[in-house]
Image: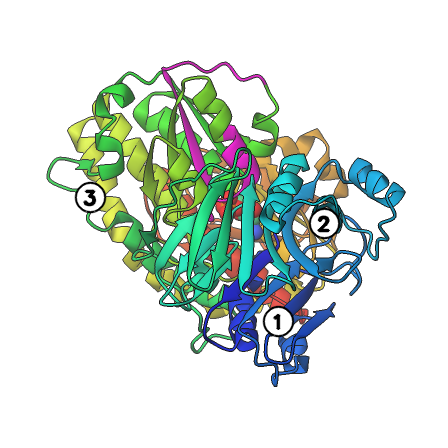
Amino acid sequence: MCGIVGYIGKRTALPFLAEGLSRLEYRGYDSCGFLVYDAAAGNIYMKKSVQRLRDAIPELDNAQSGTVGMAHTRWATHGGVTEQNAHPHRDCAHEIFVIHNGIIENFRELKQMLEMRGHRFASETDTETIPHLIEEFMKQGERYEDAVAHALRDLRGSFALVIFHARFPDMLIGARFASPLALGIGDGEYVFGSDPSPISLATRDVIFLNDGEMAVVRRVGYDILRFQDGAQAHGVPIQLDKIAVESSKGAFADYMLKEIFEEADAVRNTIRGRLLPETGSVKLGGMEQFEERLASIQKIVIAACGTASYAGMVGRYFFEEYAGIAAECEVASELRYRKPLYDSSTLVIAVSQSGETADTLEAVKEAKRKHALTLGVVNVVGSTIARTVDCGVYTYAGQEMAVASTKAFVSQLAALNLIGVFLGRQRAMSLVMGKRIVQELARLPDIMETLLGRNDAVQMIADRYANARNFLYLGRKYNYPLALEGALKLKEIAYIHAEGYASGEMKHGPIVLIERDFPSFVIAPRDSVYEKTFSNIQEIKARNGGVIVLTTEGNHDFDSVADCVLFIPKTIEALTPILAAIPLHLFAYYAARALGRDID
Ligand code: M6R
């Protein structure tokens, strides 16, 4: 969840690093740090802060004219949120500086060994072992680059690193293992980034480092080496042509609101050029190459985390109902530790906005080891998961800057629908059914625009309920995952405790919690499980619980039952989640705003 930017070139580094780091704010952080080396003055400038970037950046000494440096946003794992624990970390001689994403699992034993050799530590972090380890190997006579490679070989865990040494100021070294790092190749300048967004400030030519690689970057060129054996690796730059880097909020107060309002466009971009209404099918270039193998798939396993896993759960219902394939969806952080039974007739679908989520990536690697076919539903072009899977369907939702994943979610839903139609039409899905779904998908972006125009109604209800301490979200079948998504967003953004439940599970325990001050948000479109959900709502009312219902336009069953009613236009049951997402996202956003939360 942390962010890395490194720069070496001809610009003044500090403002570049500040702008680059701001582009990584969406990843979340609790502290930040900057380092710049000024060759003329022989001066190292380092500033760490536990403030938000917008408060820390004005405090930077902009007179610093150095053209090499690095910056980091930290999300505390080892040691509290203090300036001391913020990155960069340095060795005893204050010459070697490291910023790091990931976790060094063997840091305790390394630290113990280093302390026995006289190294003194200034922080509680796992990261600090790295500069000391490099220092130790240099003391033993190793060249700087060799000492770095040696240290990297001794680390266990995950890392993306950028390293600076004051005695080699015209060089930056970056390395990765199980945590993403990319190198931008500009005109006389180089940028490291934990994702491409800061890199795109300088160049669109990017090398995504592979696990086990280090990039030794000098002002006049670079080498990509394998740190295991020092052999040259073949880092081939790719063009970031498909990554739209949105750095402005435009007229919106927050990125989250802007991105919710981009949900219709996100779906438009996902389906653009892919619907074939005449034949009731879809064109997915990334899957065509595997057409034959996909036709023989017997089981689908969807791996994802957080919001992406809720999209995956909706996908599971769709694959079973429309493609007739047994499907399951599991959070990747569990799936990767199971001993799942895969073979070459299994399709493992990894859903990820960033394409860098470590658990999802590991689930893909495990699937590949077991000869399953792997397919990515990924937003960030060229990301690690996108490069690891056998085939893929990009979502093209555009960059998400807010912490909350919103437009990526609806685009994931649309992409999974497309995949379902592709697989369904290979099997028993009729021409008529294929046409119906494809035509309905084509209509959705316009319907979504209309729905977004009704944001005021959601805001009024959110203002009314923002002071609730607890919330229950309920849904069935296709909209059970949406209940989970609504609850996650309310927790993540408004910091209100919320539980997402399958409506049918309410009577198996949570119903005892219902009372006047414990409201429920029920997703109840007129679908195949409507009557059941209706009964649940009556059970809540019988206990005096407040109820907000999200139902289908024209349905007035709740006028005298619910406290508040929101509507979504009528569509195919399987596509209702794409519409339901909008009021759920807006509700969490406006509740957070009413409470004065720091939304992005
Ligand atoms: O980049 P990914 O889609 O793999 O990320 C997965 C989750 O971390 C992400 O969806 C998270 O749950 C969101 N911040 C929720 O809004």
Is residue 389 left or right of 424 when viewed as pictured?
A: right
Q: Amino acid at mark 3?
A: Leu
Q: Earlier in the sequence, mark 2 or mark 3?
A: 2
Q: Earlier in the sequence, mark 1 or mark 3?
A: 1
Q: Residue furthest front?
A: 141
Is residue 357 magenta-colored?
Answer: yes
Q: Which residues are magenta?
A: 339-363
**Image point 35% across, 47% down: which residue?**
395
Asked if the residue under mark 3 is in contact with the one under mark 1, i.e. CB atoms within 8 Å, the reply is no
* Callout 3: SS: strand
Q: Residue 517, position in %: x, y? A: 74, 55
How far apart marks 2 and 3 lie (CA) works out to 48 Å
Residue 36 marker: 1
Q: Which residue is mark 2?
A: 127
In front: mark 1 or mark 3? 1
Is residue 176 left or right of 259 when viewed as pictured?
A: right
Q: Which residue is mark 3?
A: 275
